[in-house]
Image: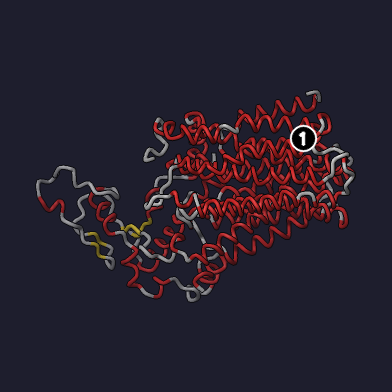
Amino acid sequence: MDFIRTTTLGQVLHHASGRRWLRNADESDVSILATYVDREASKNLARWGSISSRHDLPYTDGTSSFYEEPRINIASGAIIHEKHGKDIFLVKFTEQDSENPRNWSTRKRAFVTAVICFYTTSVYIGSSLWSSMVHSVVEEFSVAQVIAQLGTSLFLLGLGIGPMFFSPLAEIPRIGMNNIYLLTNLLFVLCQLPILHSNNLSTMLVFRFITGILASPCLAQGGASIKAMYSARDMGIPMAIWDTATAVATFSGPIMGNYAAEYRGYLWPMWISFWFSAAGLLSIVSFLPETSPDNILYRRARRLRVLTGNNKFVSTSELANSNSTFASIAKDSLIKPLSISFKEPVVLVLNSYLALVYSLLFAALESYSVIFIDIYGFSPPHEGLTFLGGLTGSLLALAVYAVFYHFYQQKLFSSDDKIKPEERLLPAFVSAFLVPIGLLWFGWSARPDVHWIMPVIGGAFIGPSSAGLFFAIMNYLPDAYPTVSSSVLAGMDDPHFLTSFSLLLCANLIFFVIGNSLMRSVPAAALPLFITPMYKGLGPGWASTVWAVLGCLFAPAPFLLYRYGGRIRLKSPRARHDF
């Protein structure tokens, strides 16, 4: 019952019953209230207007009573001997607080992680399901293939733009993460109905863009929810599982969608997305508790104000954001990534590398139809089955990383739960070279005189090697730049190919300054529009070689950072200097 109490469903039942059902511990036992107050911080706030102690300051009133300990009276709401500052009760987590996500049982944290992974998969699968409809959309609406592929591009573009709006909202304590998940997923489900019932391609494409925006919180905030539950030492494997959930969604879409489009009609891939996202909505409503510590403390302070009639109960998150507005948070969310990208070359290089890897992954995925349908003569359902190689490879990569992390990397943490950031880059040593190797294998083995299993095996290297780079870099950047971690992560012969490729490079140069999420999504959104002409014009071998060469240009980055990263961090005011 305690688990259900903290979910959206539990909160609804609690308020609908007039606070009689699923009661909080402090609503049943008022004596607990005193344990929620951070007495030392409240005293410092009363005396100095700041949480930290200032005993080193000189006397200002000439009496020793200036340093007398204020007495906190919970019942009356008075702080005795207040000299100046803020007369409030600062609400905190207790040492073994069951509401603190870090103190949840291993079983509960594992279950919540599974719910977040399912929610991510149920929404993100929509990014690749549209590719199963492209040929049918071309025939149904008599449009060029590049127009039909806009359904994928616009969804990916929405994924990059969405965090610019939702990430600032999630930082406001009274909103938290669950409200963002609930609202956006509900709208995501509803906005798929116009796609399913419209006979107009323009309407379908507009709502694909909107659903992409609404799908973004599962990627932008899902990792933050997992980080809230685990310490730095224990976070590696859960984060890898969550990253793998996105790969599972990417590869599973065409496997299911190609069969559905072939045998049930071109709109059935979108029905799969609709039912999956509806199941995801049901799971977060019923089984996902709030994971934002700021929101949990805010709700606790608000509850205590109601129970005691004392408005002096304030959470640390409310205090820190007392002068913040959505506009100021949004401005900060946009300016910080811009500033950091210009001032931190490490962030710029690694974010560019992630953008390239993300683009390489979607380049390979979009080329599957050219290779397996045009060259090997597969039917669409059988072409979808070739994605099983990437799906299997991603799951194997997760297993290998879990073994490596458990038996080696986890042991590198110090007793105070710290690790040298560069040690996070070790998985990238292998993945940096497997990406171009997989691309070359995939492209050059795609010939009629070579068995089709060879490009399937080559493609199986691309997904897991991309995941390995994501595991390494997404853990390294927040660890190396902890004070600005949210900004670090938020923030040819064919003429058609030459034009599109130039636009892609320009998009990279323009959008890298916005943030990690948008930087990855914009190039990936451009790819479906020209990848098919590229692979048909250059041939799979040379087209894959172009991407492999780009991958090789960035391959030395993890090795150089491992060797010189510590020295570079010492020159940055935003980076860690303790290793």
Return the x and y of residue 364 as percentages of the image width and height. 74, 40
Q: Is residue 283 placed above or below 403 in the rendered structure?
A: below
Left of 294 or right of it: where is 519?
Answer: right
Residue 64 visible somewhere in the drawing: yes
Residue at image position (75%, 25%) is 499
- Residue 453: percent from the left, percent from the top? 80, 47
Marks counted in the figure total 1
Query: Left or right of 361: which side holds 63?
Result: left
Asked where in the image residue 306 lies, by quadrant, the reply is bottom left
Residue under numbered circle 1? 531
Residue 543 screen position, x and y as percent: 77, 31
Q: Quadrant of residue 58?
A: top left
- Residue at 39 percent across and 40 percent down: it is 579
Colour scheme: secondary structure
Q: Residues within 10 Å of mark 1 (few under 14, many from 20)?
A: many
User: Can I make out residue 174 in this image?
Assistant: no
Viewer-side residue, 450 vs 353? 450
